[in-house]
Image (spheres, rainbow, N blue to C red):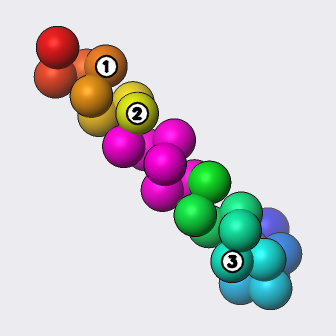
Amino acid sequence: MLNSVNTNPGALIALNQLNATNRELIET
């Protein structure tokens, strides 16, 4: 999985966006 993330920057960006969304849901 780490290799696929490293070779797919788009997947890393999507994960970062998902983490940000989860953080907002938890804070509210």
The residue lying at 27 percent from left, 28 percent from top is 24
For mark 3, what is the residue? 9
Q: Residue at x 40, y 33 (%)?
A: 21
Which disc number belongs to residue 21?
2
Q: For mark 3, does the 10 Å Cα neighbourhood hold few (<14), some (14 to 19), or many (20 or more) residues? A: few
Regarding residue 2, the answer to whether it shows in the image is no
Instruction: Please indicate whether residue 1 sits to the left or right of residue 9 in the image.
Output: right
Q: Which labelled disc corresponds to residue 25?
A: 1
- Number of on-image labels: 3
Q: Where is residue 26 in the image (x, y as percent from the top left)?
A: 25, 20
Amino acid identity at mark 2: Thr
Residue type at tag 3: Pro
- Dot 2 crowding, Cα within 10 Å, few <14, some 14–19, many 20+: few
Q: Which stretch did the figure color magenta?
A: 15-20
Q: Distance between the residues labelled 3 and 2?
A: 19 Å
> Taking 18 as reference, is 15 above or below it?
below
**Which quadrant of the figure has residue 6?**
bottom right
- Tag 1: Cα neighbours inside 10 Å, few (<14), some, or many (≥20)? few
* Residue 18 position in % (x across, y down): 51, 41
Secondary structure mostly taken by the magenta-highlighted segment of the chain: helix
Q: Distance between the residues labelled 3 and 1?
A: 25 Å
Tell me which amino acid carries mark 1.
Leu
Q: In this view, does 19 lie to the left or right of 26?
A: right
- Residue 18 covered by magenta stretch: yes
Check contact, mark 2 vs mark 1: CB within 8 A: yes
